[in-house]
Amino acid sequence: MNRTLNALRPGESAFVEAVSQEGERNMMARLMDIGLTGGARVACLFAAPSGEPRAYWIRGAVIALRRKDAEKVYLREEGETA
């Protein structure tokens, strides 16, 4: 559980393992509200040349996130056990 959402490259996908409980409570709630909850499949669609923002496909919606927010979401790869 050490790879974060920010590490996904365009075209890659994985599953949400957990959202960090450190940092702003409002941001943690927002990340979970947009569908970044355990088991959700997420795919990186686009990364700006500067690296942020990045666009992700999450539960049927395209969401743009900043690097500092995407780093709070931990992933597991397909085939990994929880």
Image (cartoon, helix red, strand yellow):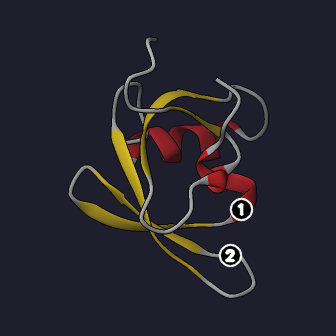
Report if the CB atoms under discs 1 and 2 are less than 8 Å apart.
Answer: yes
In this rendering, position of residue 28 left or right of residue 52: left
Calculate the distance from the C-alpha at mark 1 to the C-alpha at mark 2.
6 Å
Q: Residue at position x 75%, y 56% from top?
A: 68
Dot 2, crowdedness within 10 Å: few (<14), some or many (≥20)? some
Q: Judge from the rendering whether residue 42 lies leftward or rightward of residue 52; answer left or right.
A: left
Residue found at the far top of this picture: 82
Label 1 secondary element? helix
* Residue under the image location 50 percent in, 47 percent down: 30
Name the quadrant containing residue 62: bottom left
Q: Is residue 75 above or below residue 69?
A: above
Q: Secondary structure at mark 2?
A: loop
Relative to 75, is 62 above or below? below
Q: Within 10 Å of the Cα at label 1, are there few (<14), some (14-19), or many (20+) other Cα atoms?
A: some
Q: Which residue is mark 2?
A: 52
Question: Who's the residue at 71% across and 76% down the image?
Answer: 51
In the picture, the quarter occupied by the N terminus is top right
Residue type of the residue flagged with mark 1: Arg
Q: Amino acid at mark 2?
A: Glu
In the picture, the disc for residue 67 is 1
Q: Work out whether mark 1 precedes mark 2 in sequence or the reverse, and give the earlier one.
A: 2
**Residue 48 placement (x, y as % from top left):** 62, 84
Determine the residue positioned at 27% across, 63% down: 61
Q: Quadrant of residue 50?
A: bottom right
